[in-house]
Image: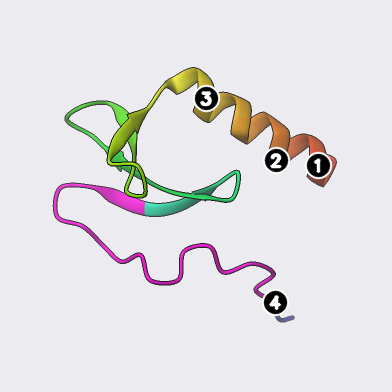
Amino acid sequence: MGYRIVNDVLEGYGARKGLEGPFNIGGRPLYYDVREGAYYDPRTDFYVDQSEVNYLHNELMRIMGG
């Protein structure tokens, strides 16, 4: 069994001290900050509201049929 990378959104995003990730959530590279309890978007330098993360995750699941 193998795998195929469909969209390498995370290319160029590596590990960051104090953050978990990066994660591809809805086509966006996000890191999880345990201290803040929120996802951080390095492209905007802002934390993403949890409702937006939930929306992106739900849309991804809808598209994938899950």
The residue identified by callout 2 is 60
As measured in the structure, the alpha-carbon distance from the residue carrying label 3 to the one carrying label 2 is: 12 Å
Residue 9: say if magenta: yes
Q: Check contact, mark 1 vs mark 3: CB within 8 A.
A: no
Farthest residue, direction right: 65
The amino acid sitting under disc 4 is: Arg
18 on left or right of 11: left
Label 4 vs 3, first from the N-terminus: 4
Residue identifier under label 3: 52
Residue placed under numbered mark 4 in the picture: 4
What secondary structure characterizes most of the magenta part? loop
Residue corresponding to mark 1: 63
Tell me the CA gap for discs 2 and 1: 5 Å
**Along the line of sight, which residue is nearer the eye, 12 or 37?**
12
- Asked whether, in this view, residue 39 is left or right of residue 18, the answer is right
Numbered range of the magenta stretch: 5-21
- Cα distance between the residues tagged 1 and 3: 16 Å
Q: Residues within 10 Å of mark 2 (few under 14, many from 20)?
A: some
Give the CA separation, mark 4 to mark 1: 18 Å
Secondary structure state at the residue bearing disc 4: loop
Q: Position of residue 57 (x, y in %)?
A: 61, 34
Which disc, if any, is residue 49? none
Residue under the image location 65 percent in, 73 percent down: 5
**Where in the figure is residue 15, as x and y percent of width and height?**
26, 62
